Amino acid sequence: MKRPLSVLLAAMLAMVMLLAGCGQEKPQAADSANFAVVTDDLGRKVELKEKPSRIVVTSASFLEPLEAVGGADLVAGRPDSKTKMPDYAKDIASVGKVYQIDTEKVLACQPDLVIINKGMNEKLVDALEANGIKTLVLDMKSYDDVKREVATLAAVTGNPDKGQQLIHDMDDKIAVVKSSIPQDRRKVSIIHSTNQGLTVQLDGSIAGSIANMLGWENVASGSQPLEKNPDAAPYSMETLVAQNPEIIFVTSMGKLEAIKASMEETMQGPAWQSIPAVKNKQVYYLPQELFLLSPGIHYPEAVAEMAKCVYPDLK
């Protein structure tokens, strides 16, 4: 019996679509065996069988994003921190200082997930995983990092919509700041001052990335970075004079008033006085709470703070 032509055509069309689909990479399907599957910043695929009920974080920078995506009641342990400690976390068990996390204190919190700050505490991963505790290594430095981690934490807490809404709100606030300032490409230098001396911040630093977001030119962009810090370069007076920045931002670690006094004394030298930023009194000290460590979900505030230095009438 001959099949109708329409039936044969339909079968052929279905076969073509099937073959075409085989050559494409399909989005990862929902995994019914897991509550969430996320990829951390070590490139590891982390599978969570169920929603975590006891989370320990090794950086205070994770506390506000967790709260924002509905995970405050899941936090069972956090590090000591003089800054970035939201009220809800003040009475939560401490697991030690950020650079000296106590593994025994972490285990005492009986966590089912430990969120580790990349570049600080990766050495904890093996010990925790050996004890059957899931780990997630995240980076929170750049704004892109923050948005990625907000989405990851929202998946971990089961509130992806809250994560997307927070990202949308942050993007909108930054867009408002950018649209409120002149679109001229200002030449800026970002100097980091500590008790040990000066370095120059590159585009990967917090202040460097924000300057780029505002459309400004970091005169140190492309400089050879320090061996142990890819986001900073050695300071050179000769190089700074040659770069001729019209604006200088100063980030700092230590007592700000003492650093400011020292910098202002240093800038009395003739080489410094030849730089337009110094001559025109366009040297600005950025607040440590936003620029020393990642501002996290306060990135829009950091963007506005830097913009207001140059354009003080910005609302």
Image: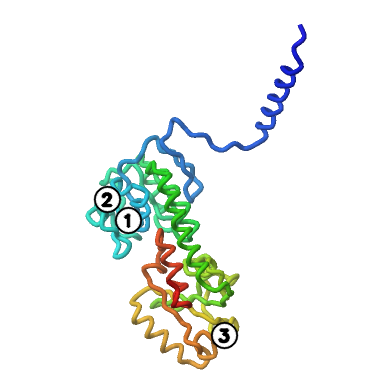
User: Tag 2 or tag 3, which sits nearer the N-term?
Assistant: 2
Local packing at callout 1 (Cα closer than 10 Å; few below 14, some 14-19, many 20+) is: many
- Type of amino acid under label 1: Ile
Residue positioned 41% across, 89% down in the render: 265
Callout 1–callout 2 Cβ contact below 8 Å: yes
Say which residue label 3 marks.
241
| x then y, percent, for residue 132 | 36, 39
**Disc on res. 101:** 1
Location of residue 313 with respect to 264 vertically, above or below: above
Local packing at callout 2 (Cα closer than 10 Å; few below 14, some 14-19, many 20+) is: some
**Disc on res. 276:** none
- Quadrant of image for the C terminus: bottom left
Q: Is residue 261 visible?
A: yes
- Type of amino acid under label 2: Lys
Q: Nearer the viewer, mark 3 or mark 2?
A: 3
User: Tag 3 or tag 1, which sits nearer the N-term?
Assistant: 1
Residue positioned 51% across, 72% down in the render: 181
Callout 1–callout 3 Cβ contact below 8 Å: no
What is the spatial separation of the Cα atoms under label 1 and label 3, in whole angstroms? 42 Å
Say which residue label 2 marks.
105
Q: Furthest-top residue in view? A: 1
What is the spatial separation of the Cα atoms under label 1 and label 2, in whole angstroms? 8 Å
Out of 292 and 197, give the one closest to the viewer: 292
- Left or right position of 101 against 179: left
Out of 2 and 145, give the one closest to the viewer: 2
What is the spatial separation of the Cα atoms under label 3 and label 2, in whole angstroms? 50 Å
The image quarter in which residue 119 lies: bottom left
